[in-house]
Image: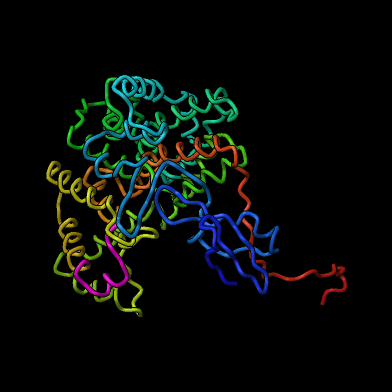
Amino acid sequence: MNADSGTNPKTGTLTIGNEHHSFPIHHGTSGPDVLDIGKLYGKAGIFTYDPGFTSTASCESKITYVDGDEGVLLYRGYPIEHLAERGDFLETSYLLLYGDLPTAAEKKDFDFRITRHTMIHEQMVRFYQGFRRDAHPMAVMVGCVGALSAFYHDSIDISDPHQRMVASMRMIAKMPTIAAMAYKYTSGQPFVYPKNDLGYSANFLRMCFAVPFEEYQVDPVLARAMDRIFILHADNEQGASSSTVRLAGSSGANPFACIAAGIACLWGPAHGGANEAALQMLSGIGTPERVPDFIRRAKDPDDSFRLMGFGHRVYKNYDPRARVMRDICHEVLADTGADDTLLQVAMELERVALHDEYFIEKKLYPNLDFYSGITLNAMGFPPSMFTAVFALARTAGWIAQWMEMISDPSQKIGRPRQLYTGSTRRDYVDIKRRG
């Protein structure tokens, strides 16, 4: 099968055998053109085969743009570096949801509505008690977020724009509370309820680390670092978890179920769990002096060791989020006085890898996960909470993706096709006659 451009710049021609079939080409505002093969099966009786969807656009979106070759990430057209340095997470959430940065009045109203939705139904406290104390926080979050639809019946009708808006507010507002309660429960400490006079990130830190027997003062450096970490993780185009949210939503499932599906997908070590793996790798290296040995092992095809936190499915240049996270990491370690040995290992590993022809040729650059594990660890989070923090932040992006999908009049239920390689038709044989 050959593909070539047609004479019309807005169409492309696929040659299959001796037949030629024309298909429209769509032009986005950025990125490569897209060949619309939606009618390919009807015209030619053939499917495309694209494992992992490496060359397939699953939807049309105006939310997030990634240029992996240039190392660019834009939320609604704004560079991630500008948002992380100049804005805050709720402003970024508003941007993702509504398409523009808020005015001062819009920001005040949005912050107010989020703050007033941070509590969860008190009966959910007993829901937590049904889990084992050693349950992974992500397991708890999948269950609790999915259960929200059993507590908030007034915001699960996806055909009602008002209910969709209320569900969106609730998800962004309650996720810090749900994540913090998961942490407290698995660590055996009492729950800490949110306070309306604290900002979004400060509130989350207090709910995670405050204890009843002493007053907890939120460190402004850590609160600001947490806010920027949330911004960096808020969205990243059509990643596995965002695609999962869209696929679940395409069936008409309620928003709480869709976000629970996204959390379950994010839990995978190849997605949200990569920062924990990177931290374990750095701990295994131990000291900067041992970096050359591990670099040699990473290049040895017969050695099972692999550098974690390097490379990305889309980013084939330096991940722009990694630069910001590296700065945040320095600030957090300086503020907390935490042992910076792991940071020294990370910096030396990055330095060597960026100047090594092997890694340059394979375009293996540090990604967001490379520094985020060190940073969250220095802030006091155990590795089991790293992905939960990721899920908290990504909820804003998931909700934006879900809202956009629901509002798209061309949206259909997701139904990928397959390349079937199983048995052809067989006749049933009575069990007594089977040899």
Q: Nearer the viewer, residue 257 or 58?
A: 58
Q: Give the residue at x 64% y 70%.
A: 16
Of residues 350 and 7, the one drawn nearer to the viewer in this rendering? 7
Question: In the rendering, at what x and y percent does residue 330 appear?
Answer: 15, 48
> Residue 232: where, in percent of width, then height?
31, 44
Is residue 358 magenta-colored?
Answer: yes
Q: Is residue 169 magenta?
A: no
Which quarter of the figure is the N terminus placed in? bottom right
- Where is the C terminus found, in terms of image quarters? bottom right
| Residue at 59 percent of width and 42 percent of height | 411
Report which quarter residue 100 is drawn in: top left
Q: Answer above or below: position of 24 versus 399.
A: below
Q: Residue at x 41, y 30 (%)?
A: 174
Q: Colour scheme used in the picture?
A: rainbow
Residue 204's quadrant in the figure? top left
Q: Position of residue 107 (x, y in %)?
A: 32, 24
Left or right, 231 with reference to 395: left
Task: Give the x, y percent position of residue 331.
Answer: 15, 44
Rendered residue at 37%/40% (across/down):
76
Q: Toward which corner of the image does residue 352 lie, by quadrant?
A: bottom left
Give the magenta part as a residue range.
Answer: 354-367
Is 25 above or below relative to 385? below
For residue 160, above or below residue 351: above
Camera-side residue of 161 and 396: 161
